[in-house]
C-alpha cells in the first residue's frame, strides 16, 4: 500500500487533471474531505487508502497501455 500523504494525494489528483470534486466523486466522498486530506487536517481511512491504491494502479496501467 502506498503511503498517502497530503502531498501525494494532491500530486495524484493534479496528475490526473482532476479537481477536488472529481476525486471526491471517484472515492465517493466529499470535496471538503479531499481538502482536509490535502491540508493535512485528517488522514484518509484505510478503506480510502486502499481505494486510492486501486485508482492509482488503474491509471498507471492505463498510461502504460497508451504508451504502447
Image (tube, helix red, strand yellow):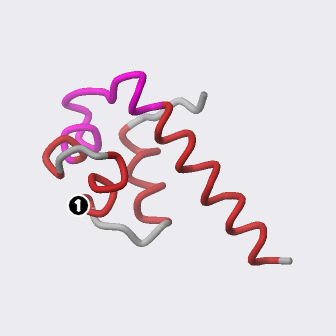
Total label count?
Answer: 1
Q: Which residue is mark 1?
A: 21
Percent of width and height locating residue 8: 46, 45
Decide: is 38 above or below 64: above
Left or right: 37 as drawn, with respect to 11: left
Left or right: 67 as drawn, with respect to 42: right
| Residue ID at (39%, 33%) | 48
Magenta stretch encompasses residue 10 = no
| Residue ID at (26%, 58%) | 20
Q: Residue farthest to the right? A: 68
Decide: is 28 above or below 14: above
Q: In which quadrant is the C terminus drawn?
A: bottom right
Q: Residue farthest to the top? A: 46
Decide: is 34 above or below 41: below
Q: Which residues are magenta?
A: 35-49
Decide: is 52 above or below 11: above
Amino acid at each position: 500500500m502506498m503511503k498517502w500523504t497530503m502531498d501525494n494525494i494532491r500530486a495524484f489528483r493534479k496528475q490526473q487533471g482532476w479537481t477536488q470534486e472529481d476525486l471526491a466523486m471517484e472515492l465517493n466522498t466529499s470535496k471538503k474531505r479531499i481538502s482536509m486530506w490535502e491540508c493535512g487536517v485528517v488522514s484518509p481511512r484505510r478503506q480510502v487508502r486502499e481505494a486510492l491504491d486501486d485508482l492509482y494502479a488503474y491509471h498507471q496501467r492505463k498510461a502504460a497501455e497508451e504508451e504502447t
